[in-house]
């Protein structure tokens, strides 16, 4: 098992209040690795610590070490020499509720490519198509690419967000409850997608659904109030009763 | 009892809501009744043939055409100086300034917002006196000076509305942009500014309206009753609000007073047109 993410004594606080304290863990490449825990336990904050997104929020302070394997190299995420924009492109993130930009479907994917990567128009367009095919959205939207992205259904919007992230060619994907705001069928499609993507990306998925974790997780972590993180072995979380008894004490 | 209270509050809310359009209709109706009869070509150009004035710049003596141009130039100059400066300061305060710097700057802007316009006019006047006594003996009150002082007057509106518009955007927008690898400036330029355009625009509306109607500042800094069409940035000029004030204060016949009302109508229409133009500008700013 090759590691892809190493977290060492990570602490994150907002306005002096600790949300994550002295947390250490190691996440294997591939996956999907699932992260569960009760609401407010700091799952989202932990994900955002990996691509330094917490820095965009007021009053946040982070200490400890986060190392990511990008390509064949280990990168210290918080080192002064690390280019944070570049890091965030290579550690992509999909959020809990679909956050399409108020742009057309195509522009949602192209804008970051043109602005952040300075890609020429034809290359951006080619990448956009490739990304839309990768999330099986191309056939649904190829005739309406210039329509506002907000006209898509929730599930389509979430796949568009996934495509937008994939178009930046990340190596690690952080997904924060990607199916929480979707209906059953749309959630099913995202789950199928995760199974397809796991061979090409390292996937770290926060989930509120134990059933989902049981179905597709390769490994599973339980986060207890930002302080303690517990790895469950596959035979524990694959066994429905064992999993639920572990989770019972959580809730 | 509660039922009656609710009915009363609803009735009161309706009444208050109707009051504004009713007052607006009254003011406009009054202006139209008094001003419309005088709203003729002669009001604009006096005895000068309109085409000669428009195409060849023939001087206009008894019309409001020079005042129209003066106000237009003034507003354009103010917009040119105040909008970029105000929006940039707003961005600075919302995105770059932190802690004490932010407090200090906000305090200065609140102070600036509290200065009455007559003081701003006096400041312009004093500035010219100072310039004349020091390194520019031939400096005089003029169009540029008025525009400068009006810029100071409207800057706080622009800064505050820009800052507020950016700061009230949801965190999610910021996180989205950053997660896609945009730098701070790219995030501002591509996502935050377009998303806050409506708020910024309302500041621009306020600023333009204020610059078009202000009389106190220009009174001290270069407007005169008879200057003809403004020749250069350093020339004296005429302006509609001052023309109205002048006519209303010194009219010698009922016809002149009627002219003042007609001029007020023109000023109203001009401000309306400027606002439409600003709206077009905003449409161009929308996320593309
Ligand atoms: N931007 C923020 N500012 C202040 N507190 C925050 C912020 N984000 C999260 N928190 C706090 O951190 C704790 C964990 O939040 P979060 O990471 O969203 O938990 P989870 O995703 O597990 O529900 C919560 O108590 C929340 O109030
Ligand atoms: Mg969360």
Image: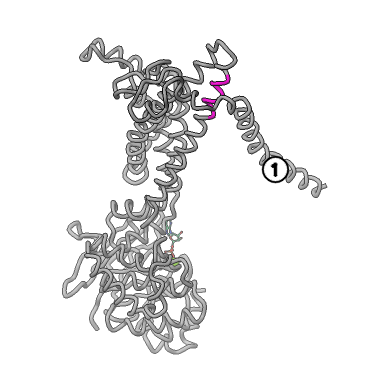
Residue highlighted by disc 1: B13
State whether residue A41 appears in this view.
no
Write down which quadrant ligand 1 falls in: bottom left
Residue B263 among magenta residues: yes
Quarter that holds the N terminus of chain A: bottom left
**Colouring:** one colour
Q: The magenta stretch spans which residues?
A: B258-265
User: Total number of numbered labels?
Assistant: 1
Residue A47 among magenta residues: no
Image x and y of residue B235, in percent: 31, 19
Q: Residue at x 49, y 23 (%)?
A: B42
Q: Is residue A178 above or below residue B271?
A: below
Image x and y of residue A71, in percent: 18, 74
Disc 1 CB within 8 Å of nearest ligand 1 atom: no
Image x and y of residue A155, in percent: 46, 75
- Is residue A47 left or right of A4 when viewed as pictured? right
């Amino acid at each position: 098992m090759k590691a892809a993410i190493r977290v060492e004594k990570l602490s994150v606080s907002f306005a002096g209040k600790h949300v994550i304290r002295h947390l250490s863990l190691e996440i294997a490449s591939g996956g999907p690795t699932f992260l569960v825990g009760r609401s407010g336990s700091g799952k989202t904050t932990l994900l955002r610590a990996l691509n330094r997104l917490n820095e965009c929020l007021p009053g946040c302070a982070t200490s400890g070490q986060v190392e990511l394997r990008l390509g064949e190299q280990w990168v210290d995420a918080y080192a002064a020499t690390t280019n944070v924009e570049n890091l965030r492109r290579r550690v992509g993130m999909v959020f809990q509720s679909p956050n399409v930009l108020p742009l057309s479907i195509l522009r949602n994917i192209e804008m970051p490519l043109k602005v952040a990567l300075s890609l020429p128009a034809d290359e951006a367009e080619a990448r956009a198509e490739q990304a839309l095919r990768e999330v099986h959205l191309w056939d649904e939207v190829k005739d309406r690419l210039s329509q506002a992205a907000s006209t898509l259904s929730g599930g389509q919007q979430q796949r568009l967000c996934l495509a937008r992230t994939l178009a930046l060619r990340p190596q690690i994907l952080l997904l924060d409850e990607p199916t929480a705001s979707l209906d059953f069928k749309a959630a099913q499609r995202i789950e199928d997608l995760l199974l397809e993507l796991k061979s090409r990306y390292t996937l770290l998925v926060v989930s509120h659904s134990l059933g989902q974790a049981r179905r597709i997780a390769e490994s599973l972590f339980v986060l207890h109030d930002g302080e303690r993180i517990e790895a469950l072995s596959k035979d524990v979380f694959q066994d429905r009763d064992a999993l639920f008894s572990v989770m019972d004490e959580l809730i | 009892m509660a039922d009656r209270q609710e009915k009363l509050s609803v009735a009161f809310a309706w009444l208050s809501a109707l009051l504004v359009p009713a007052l607006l209709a009254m003011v406009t109706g009054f202006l139209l009744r008094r001003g419309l009869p005088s709203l003729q070509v002669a009001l604009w150009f006096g005895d000068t043939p309109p085409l000669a004035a428009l195409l060849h710049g023939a001087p206009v003596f008894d019309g409001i055409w020079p005042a129209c141009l003066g106000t237009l130039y003034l507003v354009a100059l103010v917009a040119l100086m105040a909008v970029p400066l105000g929006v940039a300061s707003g961005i600075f305060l919302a995105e770059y300034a932190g802690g004490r710097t932010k407090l200090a700057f906000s305090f200065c802007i609140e102070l600036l917002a509290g200065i009455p316009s007559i003081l701003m006019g006096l400041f312009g006047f004093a500035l010219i006196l100072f310039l004349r006594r020091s390194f520019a003996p031939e400096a005089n009150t003029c169009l540029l000076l008025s525009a400068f002082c009006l810029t100071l007057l409207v800057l706080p509106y622009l800064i505050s509305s820009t800052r507020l518009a950016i700061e009230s955007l949801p965190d999610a927008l910021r996180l989205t942009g950053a997660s896609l690898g945009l730098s701070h400036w790219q995030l501002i330029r591509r996502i935050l500014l377009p998303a806050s355009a409506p708020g910024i625009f309302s500041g621009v509306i306020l600023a333009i309206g204020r610059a078009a109607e202000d009389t106190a500042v220009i009174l001290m800094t270069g407007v005169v009753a008879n200057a003809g069409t403004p020749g250069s940035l350093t020339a004296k000029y005429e302006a509609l609000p001052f023309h109205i004030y002048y006519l209303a204060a010194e009219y010698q016949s009922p016809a002149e007073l009627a002219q003042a009302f007609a001029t007020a109508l023109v000023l109203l229409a001009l401000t309306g047109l400027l606002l439409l133009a600003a709206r077009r500008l905003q449409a161009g700013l929308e996320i593309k």
